[in-house]
Amino acid sequence: MSGFRRRRAPDPGRPGTIYRSKPKLGRARGLAAGPPYLDASPRPRAGDEMLTPPVGVGTVYSEFGGDPGAAGQYGQLVDDPGHDSVGAMGSRAAGSAYPPARSAYPAAGSAYPGARPQPGDPYHPAGPQQPGGPGGPAGPGRSARRRLPRPGLRLTILLLVLLLIGYPLLLGYTAWSNVNRVDALAPAHAISDTANTPGRTFLVVGSDSRANLTAAERKKLGTGKVAGQRTDTIMLLHVPSGGGPTVLVSVPRDSYVPIPGHGQNKINAAYAFGGAPLLVRTLEQVTGLRIDEYVETGLGGFANVVDALGGVVLCPKFAMNDRDAHINLKKGCQHMDGKTALGYARARHSDPRGDLGRVERQRETLAAIAKKLLSPVTLIQPWKALPGAKAGGGALTVDKGTTPLGLAHFVLAMRAVAGGKGLSLTVPVSNPNLRTPAGSAVQWNRTQALELFADLKNDDTNAIKSMAAAQKR
């Protein structure tokens, strides 16, 4: 630095002090940064006489490799004459205004830098120090500092905690308050003699009933005016208790099975004959599994969920042009709205595999919805998450005995399958075009079907991996 700087006059009553120019604004003040007084003593009064130190003061700096004429970042250092040793300054003249000379640096073990306690020294008393002073409770050479409260930081932390806890609860409440309910399990279990099985098994049903659709909705979705109620989708979702993978099993709607009280027929006829309770009894009878939860979705609700999420990405394996399903799709992954996704999941005439191909597309569509609904990208956007939760809850019908925790288990299980942590397959089939009095139906491969259901009854989902892998080839 260059230019003239005022030097402060050394104070005879405060030996051992090194004066520096005023620190630059914004610098942290501490011993290493060069505060004006290293011993935390009071500042000199304004108007003190400016003195020029006698010749020879700089020898202290020269002895320790310093340059008394050099200017540091705070200006040129100025020694107090009383700080220099007798060897550096020579003997004091009689009547000198300066106190007896002493060493320029404190002795080892000194309680604070810059000066040693001396008898009669008002600035460095030899007796006990006051709290907060040099060597006091606040630490050597430092004055006690009171921490100021930070209400802004505390409020921010409180808001974050409330957000992390309250936002998921709000989403759950929004979904649960819009869920529909039906008495499906109690009437079935009052008659069924199926024993309890380990794990938790959900019956997932997609109803193609048009009863709750308006004329405009039927026209928009292309569902027609078919009367009555049927099941377009039947799936068993098994969550094992032993830590194995979650399994999603599709049951072809045209499966030819015995229906209690109605003889042999297609399994979706059970829903038409006796609603959800009869469908539960039929599946428990033919699989040996105890159904613990019932979840149903309708056509309109299915499309509304997809639209509330802004659409989903689905991947047809071949081009599909189906007038009945109102779709004309190219091969490959593409973004679909609610109407198109519904048609893709329901189409059967444009699929050479018929009902077997449809159940695979239904699993794909449900997995895509669950994946997007629970994705972090959706959850961090309340304007998407809240409408999605409302539409998702309104699209579902659950058993009267289902609790919010049970519904949460269903959602998490679907997410596991969608994320690739579960298994998905179809009940093994031996004849997809069985001629029956009820028309063309699907005949199960009895041996493989019994093996699949036995593994599920034993809660051994790891044993199903080979069967699921074989169906993907």
Image: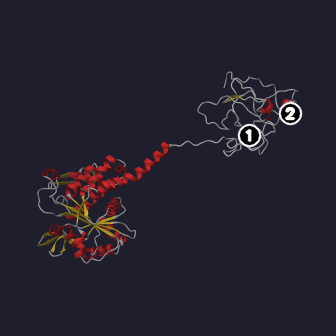
Quadrant location of the N terminus in the rendered image: top right
Query: Relative to 140, does residue 82 appear above or below in the rendering?
Result: above
**Residue 113: which numbered mark, if any?**
1
Residue 412 occupies which quadrant of the picture?
bottom left
Q: Is residue 343 left or right of residue 9?
A: left
Q: Which residue is drawn at 48% across and 42% down?
A: 152
Quadrant location of the C terminus in the rendered image: bottom left
Label 1 to label 2: alpha-carbon separation: 21 Å
User: Of tags 1 and 2, which is closer to the observer?
Assistant: 1
| Residue 331 visible in the displayed image | no
Mark 2 = which residue?
Answer: 87
Q: Is residue 128 left or right of residue 224?
A: right
Counting from the top left corner in percent of width and height, residue 54 is at 80, 25
Q: Nearer the viewer, residue 20 or 462?
A: 20
Counting from the top left corner in percent of width and height, residue 303 is at 22, 53
Residue 443 occupies which quadrant of the picture?
bottom left
Mark 1 or mark 2, earlier in chain: 2
Count neighbours of disc 2 (C-alpha within 10 A) and say few if under 14, some if 14 to 19, many if 20 or more. few
